[in-house]
Image (spheres, rainbow, N blue to C red):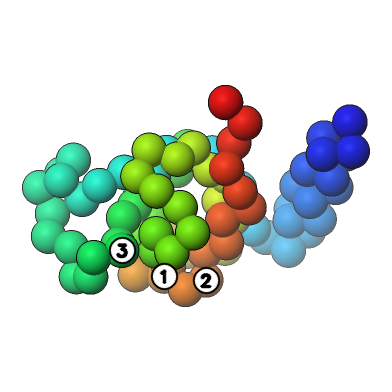
Amino acid sequence: MLKTLATLYTATSLLSLNLSTSDCTIESFDKYGWTQSFESEAFCEAEDGNIIMIDLAHHQLGDEVTIVYPSHLDSEDLMYSHDIIKILGNKER
């Protein structure tokens, strides 16, 4: 119950900051035949179709996570913005 309330509060707060949230699965660059720049690089495809590059510092390929990112950025900007993408945490399975 508290987790649900915290998630709802977080989502409401994010909307006022022009941030988007999306659930996604962390995937390997192999999916599209891309080459990684560094070993811990991966991506998530957001629900709105944006492909967002992320760092695997605290996550693994296949993790289902909720991400937060600025609404005004387009897919090209988000590909190179892993330093401003916030991963809220793993989704419950």
Helix, strand or loop under label 1: loop
Q: Is residue 30 visible?
A: yes
Whether the residues at callouts 2 and 3 have beta carbons within 8 Å, the answer is no
Tag shown at residue 40: 3
Q: Amino acid at mark 2?
A: Ile
Tag shown at residue 65: none
- The location of residue 43, given as percent across then percent down, is 34, 52
Quarter of the picture holding the N terminus: top right
Q: Amino acid at mark 3?
A: Ser
Q: CA distance from mark 1 to mark 2?
A: 6 Å
Q: Nearer the viewer, residue 55 or 60?
A: 60
Q: CA distance from mark 2 to mark 3?
A: 16 Å
- The location of residue 27, given as percent across then percent down, is 31, 43
Q: Amino acid at mark 1?
A: Ser
Q: Nearer the viewer, residue 86 or 17?
A: 86
Circle 3 crowding by C-alpha within 10 Å: few under 14, some 14–19, many from 20:
some
The residue beneath circle 2 is 84
Front of the two marks 3 and 1: 3
Whether residue 47 is situated above or below residue 12 in the rendered picture: above
Helix, strand or loop under label 2: loop
Front of the two marks 2 and 3: 3
- Single out the residue that lies furthest toward the bottom: 83
Number of numbered tags placed on the structure image: 3
Q: Is residue 8 visible?
A: no
- The location of residue 54, given as percent across then percent down, is 40, 60
The residue beneath circle 1 is 81
Q: CA distance from mark 3 to mark 1?
A: 15 Å
Helix, strand or loop under label 3: loop
Whether the residues at callouts 1 and 2 have beta carbons within 8 Å, the answer is yes
Between discs 3 and 1, the one toward the N terminus: 3
